[in-house]
Amino acid sequence: MIDSTENIGVQAAVHKGLSKTKLVKIIFFICFGSVLMGVGIEEFLVPNKILDGGITGISIILSHLTGMKLGLFIFILNIPFFYIGYKQIGKTFALSTLLGITVLSVSTALLHDVPVFTTDPLLATVFGGIILGAGVGIVIRYGGSLDGTEILAIIVNKKLPFSVGEIVMFFNLFIFTSAGFVFGWNRAMYSVLAYFIAYKTIDIVIQGLDESKSVWIISENHKIVGDAILARLGRGVTYLNGEGAYTGDDKKVIFCVITRLEEAKLKTIVEELDPQAFLAIANITEVRGGRFKKKSIH
């Protein structure tokens, strides 16, 4: 399974100080996301012998080898991580994870005998990965988790000279290699593809299609460029004081936040007004406050 490790640190605070309406909304979306993941697994991946990563992948292999219910393995293998999540991250995260895993386990059991959507392995890989990733992304966005792999990686990371991402990658490499011996190497390669598709879908769900970007511009015509961004994009700008390390000259740095769709227009503005300007653009996972949501002016 894929989780967004960088989101775990903030998940514990998601439910604090919420009204009953918001709490019900969170519970609903965690359940909805868990059911979506169940659909992706039982209606697309498992019938076509395609794996997910993490604890879910191990559960699929064990279920295939023993003939026992998949949901039972998913729930049992994640039990240790409820406790670890409670100790390392917090009670609300642990409870959200428990809710998500429970709904996922029940969903896989109920969907096991439902007729599958497709027996084409490529279609199952693509659509199974998208549906699974969407479900996981929704659960993460509302403060839960559907797999204990990242929690384990965080613990192991403290004792080994590897990053959390590298540990998760090694763990999943072992799972997909095992899938090659159990289901055949073609299915193992389909599993890797499904994993990648789910990973990208999770990013889209968490960050949204309307991705935000931070922009840094160093220009001799900073006032003209800043005014143009404000007038033509409708985005507020902030002027920061800077100093060139080589020349020692004082510089004005323009900072603003735009959407992905506004990037090309901003580049055009800068190119028109100061072709020699220094321009740096980076992705942002979240933007809050200020007037950023203000509708662009065209």
Image: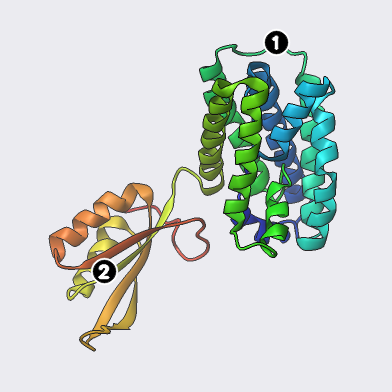
Coordinates of residue 7 in the picture (x, y in percent): 62, 55
| Residue behind mark 1 | 115
Coordinates of residue 143 in the picture (x, y in percent): 70, 51
Q: Which residue type carries mark 1?
A: Pro
Q: Residue 33 occupies which quadrant of the picture?
A: top right
* 104 left or right, relative to 271: right
Report the front residue among 285 and 159: 159
Q: Which mark is residue 248?
A: none
* 237 left or right, relative to 95: left
Q: Residue 55 occupies which quadrant of the picture?
A: top right
Tally of numbered discs: 2
Report the front residue among 15 and 129: 129
Q: Return the disc, 2 or 1, that comes first in the chain's sequence.
A: 1
Q: Residue at x 14, y 63 (%)?
A: 275
Report the front residue among 150 and 65: 65
- Would you place residue 193 above or below residue 283 in this image? above
Coordinates of residue 290 in the picture (x, y in percent): 48, 66
| Residue behind mark 2 | 226
The answer to whether residue 298 is seen in the rendering is: no
* Mark 2 residue crowding within 10 angstroms, few (<14) / some (14–19) / many (20+): many
> Looking at the figure, which quarter contains the N terminus?
top right
Q: Residue at x 55, y 30 (%)?
A: 194
Label 2 residue SS: helix
Q: Residue at x 82, y 19 (%)?
A: 67
